[in-house]
Amino acid sequence: MKLVILIPTLLFCVSAFAQQKPDSVRQTTIVKEDFKDDWANLHHYAAENKALPAPGAAEKRVVFLGSSIFEFWKQKVPQYFADHQNYLDRGIAGQLSPQLLVRFRQDVIDLNPKVVIILAGSNDIAGSTGHVTNEAIMDNIKSMTELARANHIKVILCAYLPVFEYPWRKELRPAQSIIALNKLIKAYATKQHLILLDYFTPFADSRDGQKAELTTDGVHPNAAGYQVMAKITDEAIARALKP
């Protein structure tokens, strides 16, 4: 009877031993970190921010906060930011104004800039993840402005670039919505004595879209478009940094 019980036990042990592999042969399962709870994509610049030294006493740091217009700038014309070491690009493609607001502490305040440039609203209008009103966009812009001022950061607000049609939402006609938003931004900037950086006027064509020679797809600037933006951006920053 003991032999009958012992034989299956031995077979099980032999089988288990045969399935064991040395460490050099075992496969390691890599678990990819899940960021689905990071709606505002805070991890996008987390490592870069952590590695960034505190600004020097004489450094006049400027943060560019926005979506793809800003993120693609450093990709298409990297020399612009290489030539301006005090300019920090914190654009993330596809982001809505509430996401910029959530990121504002990490990607603006904690970097101790003298100036922040806020470019917001196009993805909200495009309905990338839902439809919102221009008033709701303005609420987020106002909140970011108030946060900046509470932390002694000067604010430059941007009149958004014209868009006649989004390639990914051809059924929309966003031109008038962007014009209406820009009017609200301008009125708020005037009332609050903020600098307005007008990206709309130099890009606008007869349809209130972007001039063909300045854009890749009617939404995003090409290298020539970024050269236009660079000139007026530098002028606005110079005004903001005046004592």
Image: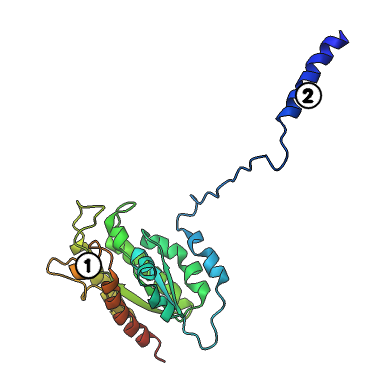
- The numbered dot on residue 214 is none
Q: Which residue of the protein is positioned furthest toward the top in this rendering?
A: 1
In the displayed structure, does residue 137 sit left or right of residue 85?
Answer: left
Q: Which residue of the protein is positioned furthest toward the right in this rendering?
A: 2
Q: In the rendered structure, which disc, 2 or 1, sits on the residue that comes first in sequence?
A: 2
Foreground of the two, 70 or 120:
70
Query: Pointer 2 and pointer 1: residues touching (CB < 8 Å)?
Result: no
Residue bearing mark 2: 13
Disc 2 packing (10 Å; few <14; some 14–19; many ≥20):
few
Separation (CA) of disc 2 from disc 1: 73 Å
In the displayed structure, does residue 195 sit left or right of residue 43?
Answer: left
Residue, x 48% and y 69% (percent of image)? 107
Res 97 visible: yes
Above-or-below relation of 26 to 115: above
Foreground of the two, 183 or 51:
51
Q: Which residue of the protein is positioned furthest toward the left in this rendering?
A: 206
Which image quadrant: the N terminus?
top right
Disc 1 packing (10 Å; few <14; some 14–19; many ≥20):
many
Q: Amino acid at mark 2?
A: Cys
Quarter of the figure with residue 220: bottom left
- The numbered dot on residue 162 is 1
Q: Residue 53: x percent and y percent? A: 57, 76
Q: Amino acid at mark 1?
A: Pro
Q: Residue 21: x percent and y percent? A: 71, 35
Which image quadrant: the C terminus?
bottom left
Q: Secondary structure at mark 2?
A: helix
Res 191 visible: no
Q: Secondary structure at mark 1?
A: loop
Q: Residue 6: x percent and y percent? A: 84, 15
Residue, x 56% and y 78% (percent of image)? 54
Residue, x 77% and y 24% (percent of image)? 14
